[in-house]
Image (cartoon, rainbow, N blue to C red):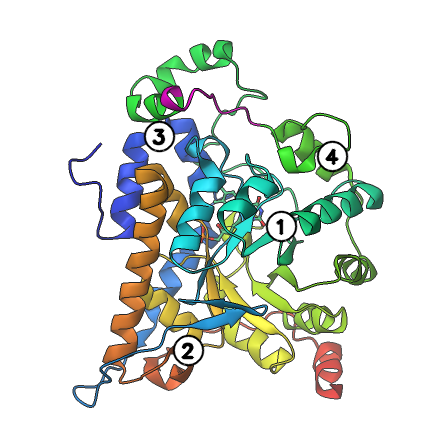
Amino acid sequence: MAKNAWFETVAEAQRRAKKALPSSVYGALVAGSERGLTIDDNMAAFGELGFSPHVAGHQAVRDLTTTVMGIPISLPVIISPTGVQAVHPDGEVAVARASANRGTIMGLSSFASKSVEDVIAANPNTFFQMYWSGSRESMVQRMDRARAAGAKGLIATLDWSFSNGRDWGSPQIPEKMSLKTMINFAPNVLPHPQWLLRFAKSGRIPDLTAPNLTPPGGTAPTFFGAYYEWMQTPPPSWEDVAWMRETWGGPFMLKGVTRIDDARRAVDAGVTAISVSNHGGNNLDGTPATIRMLASVAEAVNGDVEIVLDGGIRRGSDVAKALALGARAVMIGRAYLWGLAANGQAGVENVLDILRGGLDSAVLGLGHDSIHELSPADFYIPPTFSRTLGATRSTIEATTRH
Ligand SMILES: Cc1cc2nc3c(=O)[nH]c(=O)nc-3n(C[C@H](O)[C@H](O)[C@H](O)COP(=O)(O)O)c2cc1C
């Protein structure tokens, strides 16, 4: 471990994560798909937006607070759900503690390694995430469990289309971790004693099961077992989305929207919030960066539902840009995973502090006293920057009918 565990940027956290993690675990977090066009564009697109800062008239105190689906948060950054599995023995519980300490919302994946009960004990402001997977009966049972545990919202992630393969190669992940598989993985693991030591100290090995998908009276499926069930499930219709929203009965976020026709349908299905997301570039490669679609989606829903931006956030200035283009808040994925790998709970807190600091600098330099004043006028936006997806003649007609 580096002598000073604190890091100054998310890029440095990623470098430390790469050193600390076995290459298969690191590779699973880098992820991406096919040529990596989307994952690259998600990050690079932010660099095309230029600040237009003021030189005087700055505000001494800046307000960074907001709400997402009714939950007050101290900064407009929330945790996107990821199955962190083998990154750290405390996994999602460490992320939940860190997000609670920094006053924000935890998104918990249904593929996570920790139970929804343990995570909510660490951060009561948790949204539980589900895919459209399994029978309706099992989906109801999972929703009931999350609701009983105290989840404050449901995130339905529906953009996944089982794209697989990447030109730089996929990591080898065992079906189940045992001492034998750990030994088989020794060449991969031994150069990373810090990772091994953390698990050894915790007395646990990463078990690669999904405890939040345990059927009543049964045992937790393996990650791959859960993935297989999902692949076998007929994909949902818009009526199914409305059913899920109604069955949940509380704040409901649809994650994965990029098209304006889908955004309008999501409004019709009664969702509370839309996450403009392309699954962090892990799904259909060639989907443009989410920041490019944000303004068109925000315009299409015209305030009917909340909009959050997910994908490519690595610095506070990225958060400022997303808010200026119509997001209420952003969701982060890899940024906190790098922090978790680099320094556990403190590393996730470090990442949230970096984003808070960078956002505050942006609001200061732009002369605002609140994040709610950020607007496109604060940036140079190249004429070719934005993308509008799903604007067919019929959808334009449907949109203007609303
Ligand atoms: C390792 C990994 C696992 C993920 N697992 C899930 C998941 O279980 N559920 C989900 O909705 N999204 C999942 N995602 C997508 C993230 O929620 C999020 O959309 C994405 O990471 C955002 O992009 P960013 O990493 O650039 O911030 C995962 C992403 C990564 C990198």
Q: Which residue is mark 1?
A: 129
Which residue type does callout 2 highlight?
Answer: Ala
Residue assigned mark 3: 21
Q: Label 3, label 2: how many angstroms apart (C-alpha)?
A: 36 Å
- In the rendered structure, which segment of residues is drawn in magenta? 200-208
Residue 189's image quarter?
top left
Q: Which mark is residue 229?
A: 4
Going by the image, does 159 lie left or right of 32? right
Ligand 1 closer than 8 Å to the CB at disc 1? yes
Precedes in sequence: disc 3 or disc 4: 3
Q: Looking at the picture, which amino acid does disc 1 mark?
A: Gln
Q: Which secondary structure, mark 2?
A: helix
In this view, the mark in front (2 or 1): 1
Label 2 and label 1: CA atoms lie apart by 27 Å
Q: Earlier in the sequence, mark 3 or mark 2?
A: 3
Q: Tell me the CA gap for discs 4 and 1.
A: 16 Å
Disc 1 is placed on an element classified as strand
Badge 2 vs badge 1, beta-carbon distance below 8 Å: no
Judged by its main secondary structure, the magenta piece is: loop
Which residue occupies the foreground of this view, 71 or 213? 71
Q: Secondary structure at mark 3?
A: loop
The mark lying in front, picked from 3 and 1, is: 1
Residue 264 spot, x, y in % from top left: 70, 74
